[in-house]
Each structure stands twice: as C-alpha cells, then as structure tokens.
Amino acid sequence: EAQVTQNPRYLITVTGKKLTVTCSQNMNHEYMSWYRQDPGLGLRQIYYSMNVEVTDKGDVPEGYKVSRKEKRNFPLILESPSPNQTSLYFCASSLVGQGTQPQHFGDGTRLSIL
Amino acid sequence: DAKTTQPPSMDCAEGRAANLPCNHSTISGNEYVYWYRQIHSQGPQYIIHGLKNNETNEMASLIITEDRKSSTLILPHATLRDTAVYYCIVVQGAQKLVFGQGTRLTINP
C-alpha cells in the first residue's frame, strides 16, 4: 500500500532533549516536505526536499533541521526542542514532474515539549 | 501564489450534495486549483485538482468558472464520513501548499 509513515505518532518530552521524527515513503517520490499545524495558524511548511541531498527552508524553519540521504526518508530533527515547538507535525511527499502532482500526507506526529 | 477565500463553515444533510465554494480572484494562468480535506487531526487528504476544465473523480467534482476566479467542490452524496475541514489551494507547482483556514463542513444525519 502506498503510504507516508511517520514515527512516533505521539511524543511528550522535555526542553532541550534532542529528538528526531522519522518520515518514510514507499512511492519513490522525489519531493518530501514537513509541515506543522497549530490552532488558528493552519499548516505551515517547515522544510522541503526536491530530491536526495537537496533541502531548503520553508516558512518556519527556525529550530529544525532535516536531512535527505535516501530518497525514501526525510527525518525532522529538533536539536534543542522548546515549548513553542509543541505542535502537530505532518510529513508529505509527491512526484516532481510536468504539471502538478498531489501530495500524500502521513498521519501526523503530535509533539509536546514541556 | 494566489490567495483563496472560503466560508468558515457549512452544513449539509446526509445524502444531499455538498457544494463548497472558493474564491481565487487573483489566480494566474498557470496556477492550479487543488482541494484537500482534513478529518479531525488526520493528515490532509488530496481530493481533486484542475486548471480550467471541470474535473470529476471517484470522490468529487470540481467546477471552475470560465474566468477562473472561483470554483466549487461538489460532493455528490455526502455521508457522515465527509465531515471535515476542506481546503481550497491555488498553486503553481503543487509542491508548496499554503493552507488557509478552510471550510469546516458538517454533514448532519
């Protein structure tokens, strides 16, 4: 089944403790992206990647890192999490090509930073 | 990317057609209209997209006006499972999606 898988789905942790949220897709998509969703602010893009070893900042990249060493994986790294990073996070992927391609989203990761 | 305007909420009776409007008066010639929906706090789900022609798939129909300044998403026979927030997004290349507040559609039994 074609899917985008995020782990963990839920995490409660403390300020400053490094964490990684993994994202994996099995559709051979070139494009992958991370969004965060906060009440009243909608979904906002954090980082995106057009292909392996190619990453770029989205609208709210501060406090986050990403890497794209393999096509299928796009982990989101919080080196020193802070309470303002408490949010619902979504990973997405799509093909890149002529015209437009729909994005496929994971089920989300709810992070609570205390 | 062009901005979109959607009503914040709508209600529809189960079994009836749900018609969700979207205004995108500043859309440019190479921008597509995309619709996604989000059920509770699940990941957004792609529904349909179009450039200028009307489109239909197994989930919905998309009607785009001739001047492309507005569109309507039609769910032909709404069910309770269609209760969700529906997002209309105008984008040139589908990679950067800018989500607004969407329309909260409630299907009533």
Image (cartoon, rainbow, N blue to C red):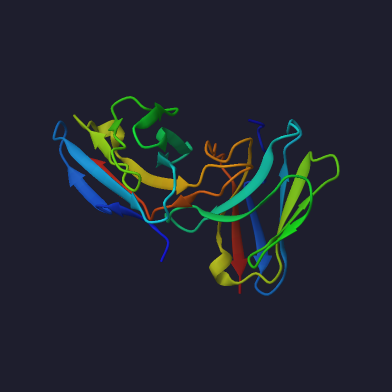
Name which quarter of the figure residue B93 lies in: top right
Q: Position of residue B35 (x, y in %)?
A: 62, 50
* Residue A28 relative to residue B54: left or right: left
Q: Nearer the viewer, residue A36 or A75?
A: A75
Name the spot of residue A74 as percent of width and height, x first. 32, 42
Q: Is residue A59 left or right of residue B83?
A: left
Residue at image point 45% right, 27% down? A59
The residue located at (45%, 57%) in the rendering is B40
Q: In the image shown, does B13 or A24 lie closer to the viewer?
A: A24
How many discs mark residues in the rendered view?
0
- The one nearer the camera, A91 or B109, is A91
Report if residue B13 is visible in the image: yes
- Asked if one can make out residue A114 in the rendered structure from this viewpoint, the answer is no
* Image quarter hosting the N terminus of chain B: top right
Locate residue B12, reporting x and y percent. 67, 65
Instruction: Classify B103 as above or below A63.
Output: below
- What residue sits 68% from the left and 44% below the top? B33
Q: Quadrant of the C terminus of chain B?
A: bottom right
Q: Position of residue A51 (x, y in %)?
A: 41, 37
What residue do we see at 67% from left, 31% from top?
Answer: B2
Image-based side of A39 in relation to B56, left or right: left
